[in-house]
Image (spheres, rainbow, N blue to C red):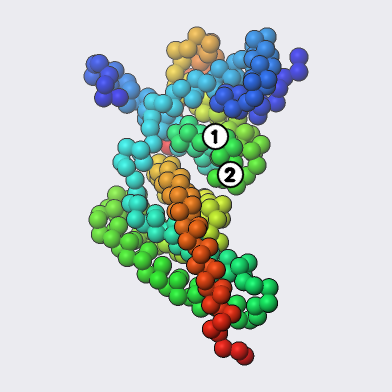
Amino acid sequence: LIERASPDEHVAALEEAEVIRQALGQLPDIYRAVVVLRHYQGLKLREIAEVLNVPEGTVNSRMAEGLSQLSRMLEPQFPNYKSNRARAEKRTREPLLI
Amino acid sequence: MKHPNRDEWVPFVFGETTPETAQSLNAHLASCAECRTQVDSWRRSLKRLDAWELPAQRRGGIFSRPLVAWAAAAAIVLGIGFGLGRLAPPSADPKKMARLEAAIQATLTAQIQEQVRKHVAAELGRGLGQTQLVSANDLASLEARFTAARKADSAQLAKEVVSLLEAQQDEDRAVTEAILAKFLALRKDLETVATVADEQLQDTQLKLAQLSTASLPEH
């Protein structure tokens, strides 16, 4: 973040980080756990299954649901992707609430 | 068109499938807009997650290594009683073994609890309690769980810590991630200590088992 060129970009990056933090915070615990363990802790799906003491299939289904919920929360917040522009325009852009 | 199950895309997105599976899923993706939309949106979300990092990674950590090491040692040493039973000669009197196990566990538990308690006090003394991330109750709860973790395998300890995580009622959601991060560090430490201690422990267990058949009075 601190390496960004302009103050505006720095603020934008901080805002983006806050949106992500809030979205993760809104994710139910069982989904957040697998997302955090994979993405931030770098554990393999097999290792997550071991740590959480659940079958690997359960990790996969929790991850699928977690990523889908995250996408539903984040896509309206970042409507500047071509692929989801149409959908984002249809929706009202609601702020994330915590 | 038959779509792959949604869960099947998870290992694919993280690059954890076999090359054959990846090839077949890639082929489906090339011809199926519906699945492509889903996979793309997952990938975008994962990329966006990089905009935020775990508080634990920035702040360093809640618990210092000595406490973690002691917790790990506690779990390992408390498992000694279970090892004794396996190592004892078949002719050993079960009652004698049970008494010996109880005596050893009582002594070791007291010693370890004292050590962990000292370290918890030291942690709090260093101002970690002021971070509001970890209250004295959290530490006391951790201490209780570790000293109660009689089986030394990491899976058992993992369950204990995961249940602690599940019981976490803190309003600050970041705490869960921070503790999760510490749990992973703890698990790594536990495995390291376990590897190093295993040989010594087996040697000690053998000696204690031999001692038990020689020195306990008959009854």
B139 in relation to B60, above or below? below
Quarter that holds the C terminus of chain B: bottom right
Q: Would you say residue B163 is visible in this rendering?
A: no
In the image, taking residue B71 as reference, residue A59 lies left or right, namely right
Q: Furthest residue to the bottom?
A: B219
- Respond whether the residues carrying marks 2 and 1 are from the same subunit: yes
Mark 2 residue type: Glu
- Name the residue at 62% across, 71% down: B88
Determine the secondary structure under disc 2. helix
Query: Which badge, 2 or 1, is on the more N-terminal residue?
Result: 1
Pointer 1 residue: A44
Pointer 2 residue: A50
Mark 1 residue type: Lys
Q: Distance between the residues labelled 2 and 1?
A: 10 Å
Question: Looking at the image, how many numbered discs can be counted on the residues?
Answer: 2
Determine the secondary structure under disc 1. loop
Residue B47, percent across and down?
46, 22
Residue B71, percent across and down?
42, 58
B160 in relation to B117, above or below? above
Q: For mark 1, does the 10 Å Cα neighbourhood hold few (<14), some (14 to 19), or many (20 or more) residues?
A: some
Chain of residue at mark 1: A
Q: For mark 2, does the 10 Å Cα neighbourhood hold few (<14), some (14 to 19), or many (20 or more) residues?
A: some
Comparing B87 with B163, the one in front is B87
- Name the residue at 25% across, 16% down: A5
B61 in relation to A71, above or below? below
